[in-house]
Image (cartoon, grey):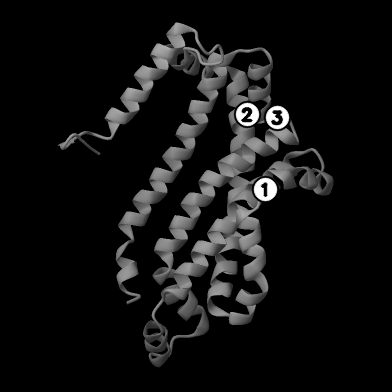
Amino acid sequence: MTLFGRRVPAMASLIFWGVLWEIVGRTGIIFILPPLSDVLVAAVDLVRQPSWQDATVTTLRAFLIGMALAIGFGIPLGILMGRVRIADELLGMWVNIFSSAPLSALVPVLMILFGFGERTIVAAVFLFAIWIIVLDTRAGVRHIAPSLIEMARSYGASRPALYGKVILLAALPEILAGIRLGLIRGVKGVVIGQLLVSIVGYGALFETFSRNFRMSQFWALTIILFGFALLVAALIERAEARIDYYAGARE
């Protein structure tokens, strides 16, 4: 980041907004916004409580199952759409509709289909995450140069080898980008699912804190959740950087 012709570390922006948050919180102008220092103290106390630990286990389990299903179905579906034209024409419209639709409105429908239990939350994570994975995988497959496919076939590559060792690896940068974005959307899905359908896990904590105006704990939980999403996204981004050389093999 450059400011007045001088390079400023990116952390400076975070420090600026943190200081501003602290000042606004100390003035008491907005009652729902406590000082940042109080929020950080509340976060330390929160992670020590059994209620937070139990909620984390419940939320993380639903998140991981939903993401595993989204990745397991999304990548093959994206490869299919990228390689088979008729599949792309039949499914492309629906994938684009669901990727841009307000999926929160569909969560009550999942409640009707799956009930009030953990399956609905898993389905919400799956629904939020899968479409961007499909679209990015499809984009990666369609950017593979035809000459790369022809070369693999000329060397006698079987269909499993063609898809597993050529197409999948060549599309890996876009696949990882889709997974990174899907993980962020999956975090949104698990929280919305827990709030709207089954008040468990982090959803139950958010509900308790907001109803009792325990805003320090509310914002502490929000920061923890955002931190988790950013950490996971950063890890996937580092993996993207490590395998970026695959992109050059497609040209």
Label pair 3/2, CB-CB below 8 angstroms = no
Point out residue 130 in the picture as x, y percentages from the top left corner. Answer: 60, 56
**Which quarter shows the N terminus?**
top left
Which numbered mark, 1 or 3, is in the foreground of this view? 1
Is the C terminus in the top left, top right, bottom left or bottom right quadrant? Answer: bottom left
SS for tag 1? helix
Q: Do the residues labelled 2 and 1 touch (CB within 8 Å)?
A: no
Q: Is mark 3 on a helix, strand or loop?
A: loop
The answer to which quarter of the image holds residue 187 is: top right
Q: Where is residue 20 in the image (x, y as percent from the top left)?
A: 37, 18
Circle 3 crowding by C-alpha within 10 Å: few under 14, some 14–19, many from 20: many
Residue 119, image x and y in percent? 74, 44
Residue marked by disc 2 = 202
Amino acid type, mark 1: Leu
Alpha carbon separation for disc pair 3 and 2 = 6 Å
Mark 1 Cα-neighbour bin, 10 Å: few <14, some 14–19, many ≥20: some
Is the residue marked by circle 2 packed among few (<14), some (14-19), or many (20+) residues within 10 Å?
many
Q: Earlier in the sequence, mark 1 or mark 3?
A: 1
Label of residue 103 in the image:
1
Question: Mark 3 highlights which residue?
Answer: 200
Q: Position of residue 146 (x, y in %)?
A: 41, 84
Gap between marks 1 and 3 measured at Cα: 20 Å
Tell me if 45 is positioned left or right of 16 in this view. right
Numbered marks: total: 3
Amino acid of disc 2: Tyr
Q: Is residue 169 above or below residue 219?
A: below
The residue depicted at 47 percent of the width and 16 percent of the height is: 39
Q: Looking at the image, do the residues carrying marks 1 and 3 touch, with CB atoms under 8 Å apart?
A: no
The circle on residue 118 is none
**Which structural element holds mark 2?**
helix
Amino acid type at circle 3 is Val
